[in-house]
Image (cartoon, grey):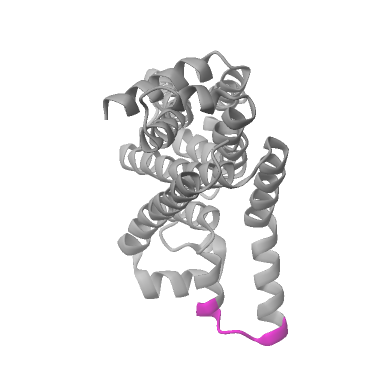
Amino acid sequence: MKTLIQVAKADLRESVRAKWFLIYSLVFGGSIVLLFALRITESKVLGFTGLSRLLITYIQLCVAVLPILILVSTVRSVVGDRESNILEYFLSMPISLGAYFWGKIMSKFILIFVPIFLALIGAILWGTIKSLTIPWSIAGYYSLLLATLSWCFLGIGMLISAVVKRQEWGLGLSILIWLVLLLFIDVILIGLMLQHKIIEGVIVGISLLNPMMAFRTGAVLLFDPELTAIGPASFVILDEMGHNGFLSFTLLYPFFLGWLFAGLGYHRFRKGDLF
């Protein structure tokens, strides 16, 4: 545990000095400032206004941008250290493979989650100053949802980084995975449903295997308890899982995927060629 924390601290110091962390922080912190500057809290969509309206927009931004930023910044971790011979230097010291790998994950999670969480806290503080109604339960659930989504894609990124041999391959694979999850899954499923008349429950179940879709649907459910925004699929989801059951699923499922992919990445890192 001591060496794991040392690896995490070393990676934190190195990453904070990197330009990507500054850009990453500005994307989410700047988006909150921009949303307030555009007076989005004074607009009204589907009956939501104030800070609730801002949180809807912020979550939509996160579901599109957060996964690719996590993947791009994470896939360099192991393979980048291997190419620059930093990994050889690390392992020449009394540091186990487990301490190195999980220390990297610990530091990356802190670097990924803290900026988006602070942006959310900043929005709540500014809303308090402006005397806006604060949806505390929604903000708390969103924090957990963002944490589990971050953990999920962090695990995917570490698996890619442990498998690929070059950073360019990792970046290309990350973009491909992001595009498939963001765009192609829904298109493919809709095409299958139209052509083969597959049962709606099967289509919805396969769709929710996409962590980005689970995240998006869970975010919508807080503001729209009947899920009217997603159409007939809402009946399948709510009838099978219920309101609280589906909220629990959207938290636990990405969290489980993150551990699964991180575990597979560690297994590949430990059994594969280190240098």
In percent of width and height, residue 177 lies at 65, 52
In this view, the residue in front, 177 or 62, is 177
Image position of 233 with respect to 125: above or below: below
* Residue that appears at 42% across and 28% down: 107
Residue 165 seen anywhere in this rendered image of the structure: yes
In percent of width and height, residue 128 lies at 36, 22
* Residue that appears at 55% across and 13% down: 17
* Quadrant housing residue 118: top left
Quadrant for the N terminus, please.
Answer: top left
* Residue that appears at 67% across and 72% down: 190
In percent of width and height, residue 109 lies at 43, 33
Q: Is residue 128 left or right of residue 162?
A: left
Image position of 78 with respect to 245: above or below: above
In this view, the residue in front, 238 or 10, is 10
In this view, the residue in front, 185 or 160, is 160
* Residue that appears at 57% across and 41% down: 161
* Quadrant housing residue 240: bottom left
* Quadrant housing residue 114: top left
Total marks shown come to: 0
**Does the segment drawn in magenta span residue 200?**
yes
**Does the segment drawn in magenta span residue 271?**
no
Quadrant for the C terminus, please.
Answer: top right
Farthest residue, direction front: 92
In percent of width and height, residue 198 lies at 60, 84
The boundaries of the magenta stretch are 195-202
In this view, the residue in front, 65 or 48, is 65
Residue 131 seen anywhere in this rendered image of the structure: no
Q: Is residue 18 left or right of residue 95?
A: right
Q: Main secondary structure of the magenta part?
A: helix
